Amino acid sequence: MKKQIWDILSLIALSIGLAGCGNSKNSKENTLTVGASNVPHAQILKHIQPELKKEGINLKIVTFQDYVMPNKALANKELDANYFQHAPFLDNWNHANHGDLVNVGKIHLEPIGIYSKKVKNLKDLKNNSTVLVSNNTADYGRVLQLFKDAGLITIKKGVNITAATFDDIATNPKYLKFKHNLEPKLMPQFYQNGEGDAVVINSNYAVQAGLDPRKDAISLEKDTSPYANIIAVRKADRNQPAIKKLVQVLKSKSTQKWINNKYKGAVIPVKSDK
């Protein structure tokens, strides 16, 4: 009799233990950890947390202050995905680090802008003006495009503008000096301090510093730019249901409407990945 009671108690304990393991496993499977820049990426992710919760996905957001650590953390499996970069930046990172991170969806564009306390129009920059640019080489092409569109420089024939560097400038009639070895997050501070004659700032840092790219920039990237911000994941995880649901909710009409209302054109939703 005692043995029978003991066997029953053992079975109950085992069942409870297995149930506990099952809940732990499900909890882990339903938690999606995404690394993001504070503005606007983390804000957008926070907005969709309730929607993902309805789908059984607990979204955990980890914020980063730079452009270096999010891809490292993703490659090291500390994250399930990240949301902070555009495709050219990801391509450069993969090439430099022998990585296999992949783009699973374009979400929004943060138009890069040029700011100045010296002139009101980019074309009004004087000869030998100094232009401060971040050390993010993946952004060089989009910066050069703005100066090219303003008629201030030309690019060497045969060079793809998205892969261009400042060495690919063919003509520079005003002898503009491009200083491009600066930390991206420090660019708003250089502008506020009046350093340089013009400062190139990514919209996420501009907005975070209280600037309105549409009003404060003397030149702003067009919404047809190929530099849309993306969700990146490890190649093996690209078809995970939770990842697909994340991208689906981020690209939903309701999320796009919220982005438009929140950022008033400083952040532009991408309606198609084509």
Image (cartoon, grey):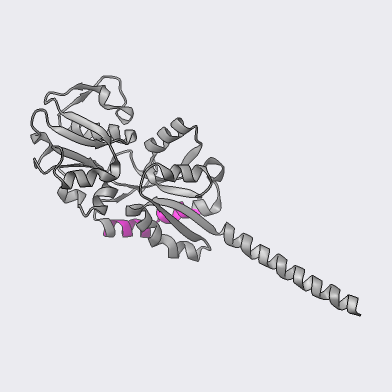
Taking the image as shown, residue 63 lies to the left or right of residue 3, namely: left
**Residue visible at 43% across and 62% down in the picture:** 49
Which residue lies most toward the right here? Answer: 1
Taking the image as shown, residue 101 lies to the left or right of residue 213, namely: right
Q: Is residue 253 visible?
A: no
Residue 179 in picture, x, y percent from top left = 22, 32
Up-down relation of residue 132 to residue 51 (above or below): above
Question: What's the magenta bit mostly, secondary-structure-wise?
Answer: helix
Query: Number of labelled discs?
Result: 0
Taking the image as shown, residue 261 lies to the left or right of residue 60, namely: left
Residue 2 in picture, x, y percent from top left = 89, 79
Instruction: Give the quadrant of the N terminus.
Output: bottom right
Report the front residue among 22 and 270. 22
Residue 89 in picture, x, y percent from top left = 38, 37
**Residue visible at 80% across and 71% down in the picture:** 11
**Residue visible at 71% across and 67% down in the picture:** 17
Q: Is residue 160 visible?
A: yes
Q: Is residue 125 magenta?
A: no
Instruction: Give the quadrant of the C terminus.
Output: top left
Residue 14 in picture, x, y percent from top left = 76, 68
**Residue visible at 20% across and 49% down in the picture:** 213
Q: Is residue 248 magenta?
A: yes
Magenta part of the protein: which range? 245-261
